[in-house]
Amino acid sequence: MSEVIYRFIVLCALFLIYSFIGWLIEVIYTFITEKKFINRGFLIGPLVPIWGTGAILITLILKPDDSLFNTAISSAFIGTFLEYVVNYVMEKLFKVRWWDYSQLPFNINGRVWLGSSCFFGLGGILIVQIINPIFFNIFTMFDRYVFCVIIILLLLLALIDFCISFNIINKLKISVDSVRKDYTEEISKKVKSVLMSKSVWFSRLLKAFPNIKISFKVKK
């Protein structure tokens, strides 16, 4: 096995791990604030890809010998930029804003805010300086071929989950389209109520993102 392929598999492993860690953090935070378990994220399984993607970008761009200040600032920028782009793209694709920081101070168009940027900065330091080295050492304990087979199988499961979840979200968009003409000023709240009764999958998504906003204009 070539070194290039192995390094790619290692990055894939980190993506899966950090996606799961992100899911776990969001579930714990929601449990503390909402007093109940909510399966956070877009996917059916316990993964939040935006966390994994951010961690991979930080891993590829930053170096362990960078200063803590540079690591924190760079990580904050990478995380904030990624969160803004994902929020914007998802809203444009599905006409839905999945999370909104408008009620918090120091936000940018409700898509990102200072608090999450600071969290990204701290997280970047932990990833580069502490967590990644631990994972790299753990990976070396496995036979390379066995390790690669396991990660590839997990990636396939994640890909299947993504395809299913994307189809569900796309149906959510279709359902939103189908009820646009029925409501006026309170359309956002009422659409959520309608979708909750349409499907268990829609219900799961709306529970995961209780502050979801439907962003479209009603045709007269």
Image: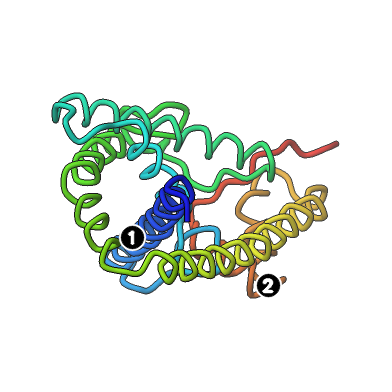
Residue 195: % across, % down: 68, 64
Give the camera-side residue of 211 and 28: 28
In the foreground, 34 or 220: 34
The numbered mark, 2 or 1, whose residue comes first in the sequence reads 1
- Mark in the foreground, 2 or 1: 1
User: What type is the residue that disc 2 sits on?
Assistant: Ser
**In screen coordinates, is 175 left or right of 109?**
right
Q: Residue furthest right?
A: 220
In this picture, residue 47 sits left or right of residue 131:
right
Looking at the picture, does residue 13 appear above or below residue 218? below
Quote the CA–CA distance across marks 2 and 1.
Answer: 31 Å
* Quarter holding residue 160: bottom right
Identify the residue at image location x=43%, y=29%.
81
Work out whether residue 140 or residue 67 is closer to the camera in this orientation and state it. Answer: 140
Q: Residue at x 21, y 52 (%)?
A: 131
> In the picture shown, does residue 111 fall above or below 193?
above
Q: Dot 1 surroundings within 10 Å: few (below 14), some, or many (20 or more)?
A: some
Report the front residue among 172 and 143: 143
The residue at 40%/49% (across/down) is 51
The numbered mark at residue 211 is none
Residue ID at (53%, 39%): 86
Quadrant of the image occupied by residue 90: top right
The residue that disc 1 covers is 21
Q: Residue 220: where, in percent of width, then height? A: 85, 36
